[in-house]
C-alpha cells in the first residue's frame, strides 16, 4: 500500500509559506483556500512553489 499523497508548498509575496499533503492538485487548492482563510489572507496571493513526494522513505 503506497502512500499516494504528495507534499504541496505555496508561498505569498511576503514569504509566508504553507505546506501540506494532498492526493491531487485540486485537493491542494481547496486546502490552500481553507488555510489562507484561517490565516486571514487572500488565497490568490499564494503561488505554488513545489510539489514533491514524501521525503522520509523508512520501511
Image (spheres, rainbow, N blue to C red):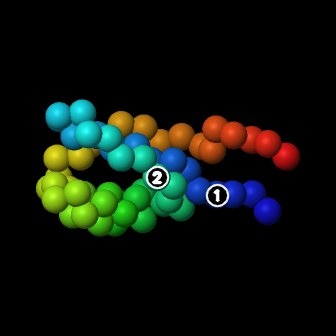
Which SS class for mark 2? strand
Percent position (x, y) of residue 42?
14, 56
> Image quarter for residue 13?
top left
Q: Name the spot of residue 51 as percent of width and height, x first.
A: 47, 42
The first of marks 2 and 1 along the sequence is 1
Quadrant of residue 14 within the rendered picture: top left
Q: Which residue is mark 2?
A: 20
Contact between marks 2 and 1 (CB within 8 A): the answer is no
* Viewer-closest of 26 and 21: 21
Frontmost of labels 2 and 1 is 2
Q: Residue furthest front?
A: 39
User: What label sits on residue 38 in the rendered view?
Assistant: none
Left or right placement of residue 34 versus residue 9 in this view: left
Image quarter hosting the N terminus? bottom right
Q: Which residue is rendered at x = 50% and y = 59% of the image? A: 22
Q: Is residue 14 left or right of residue 31?
A: left
Residue 50 at what x, y percent from top left?
Answer: 42, 38
The residue drawn where x is 79% and y is 42% is 58
Residue 21 locus on image (x, y percent): 51, 55
- Image point 23% across, 57% down: which residue? 39
Q: Is residue 3 visible?
A: yes
Residue visible at 74% across and 41% down? 57
Observer able to see residue 33: no
Label 2 to label 1, Cα distance in Å? 13 Å
Residue tagged 1 = 4
Q: Circle 1: is it few (<14), some (14-19), or many (20+) Cα within 10 Å?
A: few
Amino acid at each position: 500500500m503506497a502512500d499516494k499523497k504528495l507534499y504541496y508548498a505555496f508561498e505569498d509575496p511576503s514569504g509566508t509559506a504553507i505546506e501540506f499533503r494532498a492526493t491531487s492538485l485540486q485537493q491542494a487548492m481547496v486546502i490552500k483556500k481553507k488555510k489562507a482563510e484561517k490565516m486571514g489572507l487572500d488565497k490568490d496571493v499564494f503561488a505554488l512553489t513545489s510539489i514533491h513526494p514524501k521525503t522520509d522513505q523508512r520501511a
